[in-house]
Amino acid sequence: MRVVIQRVSKADVKVGQNEISKIEKGLLILVGFEQNDSEEDVDWLHTKIVQLRIFDDEQGRMNKCILETGMDILLISQFTLYASTKKGNRPSYAKAAPAAYAEKLYTYFISQLEKRLGKKINTGIFGANMQVALVNDGPVTILMDTKNKE
């Protein structure tokens, strides 16, 4: 499981001309699932994300997590996070989980984040062609992979 976490001052997602979801301050999280990912990967990752201290405290230091700030999350599924560019110029997505399995993990990820934060998580539409807009705050962008727990 891979995520790109971006601290944002605002973000939104559209499908066609329709705005599906938006947030003000918080996290925009792009998530991709690999074939051998499991609920264990989701559990490890959602725990890390909600405790990640990347929001400023009163002294301007990144010392607060999303749990402490009450800010929002916009979670977007993105299978292209598993693009392999090793050979040729056309990315291969062979490592990405099949859509039905990825959607199951995505739904579980949403439910676990909502449970931890005690509120609704904003999302895009799984499998849709989406337009995501954001204003990266900082900029702060963090990459995490459950197969490489640095």
Image (tube, rainbow, N blue to C red):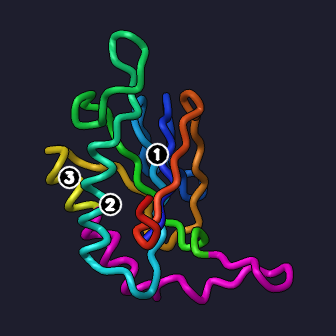
Percent position (x, y) of residue 125? 44, 64
From the image, which quarter does the C terminus lie in?
bottom left
Q: Determine the secondary structure under disc 2.
A: helix
Residue type beneath disc 3: Glu
Residue at 61 percent across and 71 percent down: it is: 80
Residue range of the region highlighted in magenta in the rendering: 83-109
Percent position (x, y) of residue 109? 29, 64
Residue type beneath disc 2: Leu
Q: Name the residue carrying label 1.
A: 28
Percent position (x, y) of residue 19? 49, 47
Residue at 35 percent across and 35 percent down: it is: 53
> Hey, which quadrant is residue 82 in on the image?
bottom right
Q: Determine the secondary structure under disc 1.
A: strand
Residue at 69 percent across and 84 percent down: it is: 92
Residue at 29 percent across and 69 percent down: it is: 107
Question: Can residue 63 be found in the magenta stretch?
Answer: no
Q: Name the residue carrying label 3.
A: 114
Residue ranking furthest to the right: 88
Camera-nearest label, 1 or 2 = 2
Q: Name the residue carrying label 2.
A: 45
